[in-house]
Image (cartoon, helix red, strand yellow):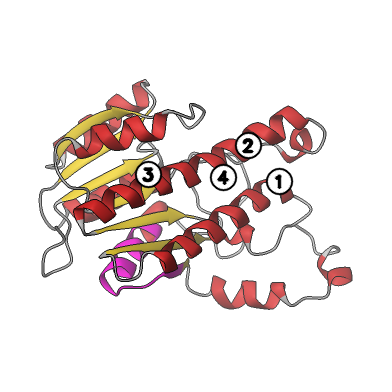
Amino acid sequence: MIDALGSPGSLLLVGGTSDIAVATAHRYLAERPLRVVVAARDTPRRTAVADELRAAGADVEVVDFDAEDPDSPARMVAAASAGGDIDVAVIAFGQLGDQGQLATDPAAAAALGHVNYVAPVVVGTVLANRMRSQGHGVIVALSSVAGERARRSNYVYGSTKAGLDAYFSGLADSLVGSGVSVLVVRPGFVRSKMTEGLPDAPLSTSPDAVAEAIVTGIRKGRHTVWVPGAMRWVMSGLRHTPRAVFRRLPF
């Protein structure tokens, strides 16, 4: 259970090798030891993350998760909950993709759509059912400002995030009164492994800043957070920019 100070006793990281997921675990571990379940593919990076979190004071469990396997979400949640209730689950997996390839390769577009949208929907459905049965829990879904309005430079990626955002926003409303809640997180450009090699965008942020927003958002009972907060107003303006102007913007 999440204690009176807002700290969970257990944390599930789905896509547990992501920089944001790891930063969130460290943010909570700075307050108290807790059980952390790292759900990811069996890679050297998963082993390194598990060792890193153990060194920081976590009781770490490792479970297999592969977003490309349609049966993986159910197995993963069952394994993660075998050791006790899941207080907070962070859904942090996804791919950016190459827009040039995605625009011409239907198979690549379909694969990105599965990993970034279909798999998170399945994970969210399984997690929601599990948390309903335990009577409490918070699901954190990593969305993106890219889902607010598709841009010509990354419209396939942006469309997957738009779908993910809509699903988890609707799921949040469906869970009211169940003891379970959903926090949708909309970061701007995050300097991380996924964006390595890309130039910084305006209002770029860091995994640590996103982790801080997640912890604060859960404690304040929010349903949506923007990182940085100013992105909310920037995207509001871009949402209402005339299309003829928007398509000429340099991004």
How packed mark 2 is, by other alpha carbons closer than 10 Å (few <14, some 14-19, many 20 or more), is many
In whole angstroms, how far apart are the C-alphas of marks 2 and 3? 21 Å
Q: Is residue 5 above or below residue 159?
A: below
- The residue indicated by pointer 4 is 117
Taking depth in this image into account, of 177 and 17 the one nearest to the observer is 177
Of the residues tagged 2 and 3, which is closer to the observer?
A: 3
Label 4, secondary structure: give it. helix
Is 116 left or right of 91, judged from the image as shown?
A: right
| Stretch in magenta | 210-225
How packed mark 1 is, by other alpha carbons closer than 10 Å (few <14, some 14-19, many 20 or more), is many
Q: Residue at x 17, y 47 (%)?
A: 85
Quarter location, residue 198: top right
Q: Residue at x 23, y 48 (%)?
A: 11
Residues at circles 4 and 1 in contact by the CB criterion of under 8 Å: no
- The residue indicated by pointer 2 is 112
- The residue indicated by pointer 3 is 126
Amino acid type at mark 1:
Val
Q: Looking at the image, how many numbered discs can be counted on the residues?
A: 4
Q: Residue at x 14, y 41 (%)?
A: 58
- The residue indicated by pointer 1 is 156
Quarter location, residue 203: bottom right
Dividing the image into 4 quarters, which one contains the N terminus?
Answer: bottom left
